[in-house]
Image (cartoon, rainbow, N blue to C red):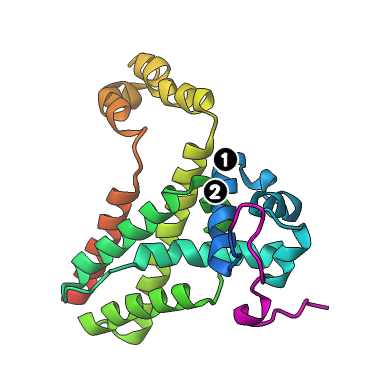
Amino acid sequence: MAKRVVPEAARRRRRPTKQGQVLSHAHIVETALRMLREHGPAGLTARRLGHALGADASTVYRYFRGMDDLILAIADELFGRAMTSFTPSGDWRADLRELGTRIHNAYLAHPQAAVLTASRVTGRPNEVAGDETILGILRGAGFADADAVRIYHAFIDQSLAFAILDAATLALPKAAREADEEVWRDTYARLPAATHPNIAATAPLLVARMNDSAYPTALDLLLTSAAAQLAG
């Protein structure tokens, strides 16, 4: 049976923790983000989180139903950071490009958390507000509802999929990441035209591009396709 979560005012600690902090939902989420950044997903446990907060592990469960509930709260926090201070300009294509970039950047700022959370659907306030904004931009641009939902689906999944892919790269140990990056120069760029004519012909371009994220290009392709449909 799920644990009962009482309102924050009722569960606030009466005294500070050993670190002098009065616990709150936001403080626990921020501490969990720091732990993910420093130790990765395997390092985020209730016991370790309680230790980092200067409290007993059971204290975490006064704020969250379980660790998965905390993961969903982290996902919603990252989405909220992407949406902070965003104001639609009225240019739907520019607005979606900005939002896509914001979402991608918000997750990449916390790559370990992104790998853990970007595939989740939270149904929480920041996520819901973001979805409402994106659908409003599309419907306001003149897309029919079915098309607005289809484009929204592709837009948000593309943003989060690239966030996971690029975050996974950033989350690699430095030596592994650098070794992967060198493959384009040390292997692909040296393949002979006699056996690999297409790779050999494009090798300098591959070396220059393939270690960067393809998300900006993919986002522009999606928006160009949507714009062509709207014009048609």
- Disc 1 packing (10 Å; few <14; some 14–19; many ≥20): few
| Count of numbered tags | 2
Is residue 176 found left or right of 59 in the rendered image?
A: left
- Residue 216 point in image, percent of width and height: 29, 50
The answer to whether residue 119 is above or below residue 226 is above
Is residue 74 found left or right of 94 in the rendered image?
A: right
Residue placed under numbered mark 1 in the picture: 38
Q: 131 or 25: nearer the eye?
A: 25
The answer to whether residue 85 is above or below residue 17 is below
Q: 33 or 104: nearer the eye?
A: 33
Residue placed under numbered mark 2 in the picture: 34
The answer to whether residue 2 is above or below residue 118 is below
User: Which element carries disc 1, helix, strand or loop?
Assistant: helix
Q: Residue at x 53, y 63 (%)?
A: 75
For the N terminus, the quadrant is bottom right
Residue 37 in sight in this render:
yes
**Distance from label 2 to label 1 (Cα)?**
6 Å
- Residue 218 point in image, percent of width and height: 32, 52
The answer to whether residue 221 is above or below residue 203 is below
Question: Which segment did they paint magenta?
Answer: 1-20
On whether residue 226 falls in the magenta region, the answer is: no
Q: Residue at x 30, y 23 (%)?
A: 203
Residue sitting at the far right: 1
Q: Which quadrant of the figure has residue 209?
A: top left
Q: Which quadrant of the figure has residue 142?
A: bottom left
- Residue 2 point in image, percent of width and height: 78, 77
Q: Residue at x 50, y 27 (%)?
A: 174
Whether pointer 2 and pointer 1 mark residues with C-beta atoms closer than 8 Å, the reply is yes
Q: 59 or 209: nearer the eye?
A: 59
User: Which element carries disc 2, helix, strand or loop?
Assistant: helix
Residue 119 in sight in this render:
no
Specify the label residue 142 is tagged with.
Answer: none
